[in-house]
Image (cartoon, rainbow, N blue to C red):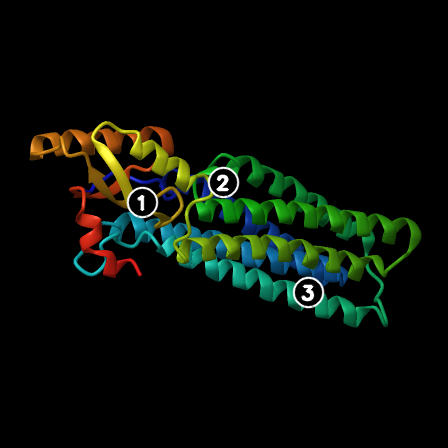
Amino acid sequence: MGHDHSHGNGVQHRSRLVVVLGLALTVLVVEAVAAWITGSLALLADAGHMLGDAFGVAMALAAISVAQVGGRPGSRRSFGYHRTEVLAAALNGLILLALSIWVAVSAVQRFGAAPKIDGGFMMAAGIVGLVINTIGIRLLRAGAKESLNVRGAYLEVVGDALGSVAVIAAAILITTMGWYLADPIASLLIAAMIVPRAVSLLRDVAEVLLESTPKDVDLEELRAHMRAMDGVKDVHDLHVWTITSGMPVMSAHVVVEDSVTHMGQAEVVLERLRCCLADHFDVEHSTFQIEPAGHFDKEQHLHH
């Protein structure tokens, strides 16, 4: 028996993502212009990072729209297009990794001859970026707990804020000490901050695509809860996985007690199981195969 429900895929955060996209593009333009004027690689690196982030937020918005418009189940895609969010997050993570490599290579090339940079203008651009990124962090903080793509966008904005801090610190060193190597060093720091976030995002995507058990679901505890239900004798072939963020699903074969002899009693058992999973484990999309005792032995060849 299957149960349908509406899943949060980031739709409720669309307006905030649109605002953050506008903020990211604003910072991108400011830092790109400032990098061209000052010659700062750190600003250029952060602008490149912002370009990746803007693309990531745009993909998140596109994925949300596709999931909302084409998310209804069909004959070929029984879960609709909900996994477009996961595919968008994967592409986002790969882009971030590519950006970090480019920034690192460019920074190393500058160690031999660091150019002179206008530290004052560089600092002003960094402060503007920090202020705007702080606004983005506040807008996405709540949604980061509910959607994989919103979480990706949130982590990117946090990284951007840290990148702005690195730009400001480098600008201070250049202005006060004339130490121009601070610029490529700040660039390497920005690259180093991008990599862990990209790897974390790709790891989460891999967990979804591998249909791993969600981190917040203890499979053995879930099995014990199901076995404790009146009318349930045993549970096997238990699987819990995630279609997309906020959409866990479960399937299981449920062996019922000998006292369950007709459909009315089976329906009572199913309702108990459904309520148990929805209330205790936040798994509302569940599918159960009801079996009489001894049926498992007849399908042993399927479990090898």
Residue 143 higher or lower than 279, as above or below: below
Residue at 26 percent of width and 52 percent of height: 79
Query: Mark 2 vs mark 1: which is more N-terminal?
Result: 2
Q: Local crowd at mark 2 within 10 Å, few (<14), some, or many (≥20)?
A: some
Distance between the alpha carbons at the discs numbered 2 and 1: 21 Å
Q: Which residue is mark 3?
A: 103
Quarter placement of the N terminus = top left
Distance between the alpha carbons at the discs numbered 2 and 3: 27 Å
Q: Which residue is mark 1?
A: 249
- Residue 90 placed where, x, y %? 47, 59
Q: Which residue is mark 2?
A: 144
Image check: 207 left or right of 95? left
Query: Mark 3 vs mark 1: which is more N-terminal?
Result: 3
Q: Which element carries disc 2, helix, strand or loop?
A: helix
- Residue 282 placed where, x, y %? 36, 34
Q: Which element carries disc 3, helix, strand or loop?
A: helix
- Most extreme residue toward the right is 177
- Residue 19 placed where, x, y %? 48, 42
Residue 73 appears in the picture as rendered: no
Residue at 53 percent of width and 63 percent of height: 94
Image check: 18 left or right of 287? right
- Residue 198 placed where, x, y %? 57, 56
Please identify the quarter of the rendering in which residue 13 is found.
Answer: top left
- Which is more toward the observer, 27 or 136? 136
Q: Are marks 2 and 1 in contact (CB under 8 Å)?
A: no
Quarter placement of the C terminus = bottom left
Q: Identity of the amino acid at label 2? A: Ala
